[in-house]
Amino acid sequence: MRLMSTDLIDARGLLCPLPVLRLRKRMRNLASGDQITLWADDPAAVIDVPHFCAEAGHLLVETGERETAQTYTVQKK
């Protein structure tokens, strides 16, 4: 499994559903087991990201806070 610095989506300032749509689009190019981190400040992301992971079968590895955003690290199934 590799985690590259380019595997970061900065979705701060974007409202629902854009953070999850960007996450979905970027995950298409990842191999199974790869991880990506999403930064989002949309309050709906707290619900939307875990829901997206559950629906798509991806693993929500970690959530947290950094600077002005919630962070979500997702591993592709």
Image (tube, grey):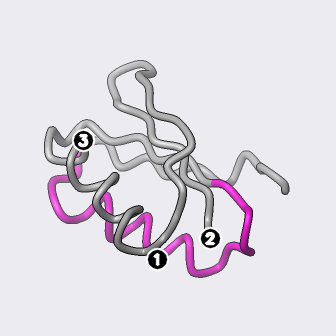
Secondary structure of the residue carrying numbered label 2: loop
* Residue at the disc numbered 1: 25
Could you tell me the amino acid type at mark 1?
Lys
Q: Position of residue 64 (x, y in %)?
A: 44, 25
- Circle 3 residues within 10 Å: few <14, some 14–19, many ≥20: some
Q: Position of residue 38 (x, y in %)?
A: 46, 47
* Up-down relation of residue 70 to residue 8 (above or below): above
Q: Is residue 20 magenta?
A: yes
* Residue at the disc numbered 2: 77
Which mark lies nearer to you, 1 or 3? 3
Q: Quadrant of residue 23?
A: bottom left
- Residue at point 33% right, 65% down? 52
- Residue at point 23% right, 55% down? 48
Q: Position of residue 58 (x, y in %)?
A: 52, 65
* Residue at the disc numbered 3: 46
- Residue at point 44% right, 35% down? 71
Could you tell me the amino acid type at mark 3?
Val
Q: Nearer the viewer, residue 10 or 43?
A: 43
Q: Left or right: where does residue 41 sit relative to residue 31? A: left
Q: Quadrant of residue 16?
A: bottom left
Whichever of labels 3 and 2 marks the residue nearer the N terminus, that label is 3
Q: Which residues are magenta?
A: 13-35
Residue farthest to the right, as pictured: 1
Spatial CA span between label 2 and label 1: 15 Å
Circles 3 and 2, Cβ within 8 Å, touching? The answer is no
Spatial CA span between label 3 and label 2: 20 Å
Secondary structure of the residue carrying numbered label 3: helix
Whichever of labels 2 and 1 marks the residue nearer the N terminus, that label is 1
Q: Nearer the viewer, residue 32 or 43?
A: 32
Q: Nearer the viewer, residue 8 or 33?
A: 33
* Up-down relation of residue 51 to residue 68 (above or below): below
Which mark lies nearer to you, 2 or 1? 2
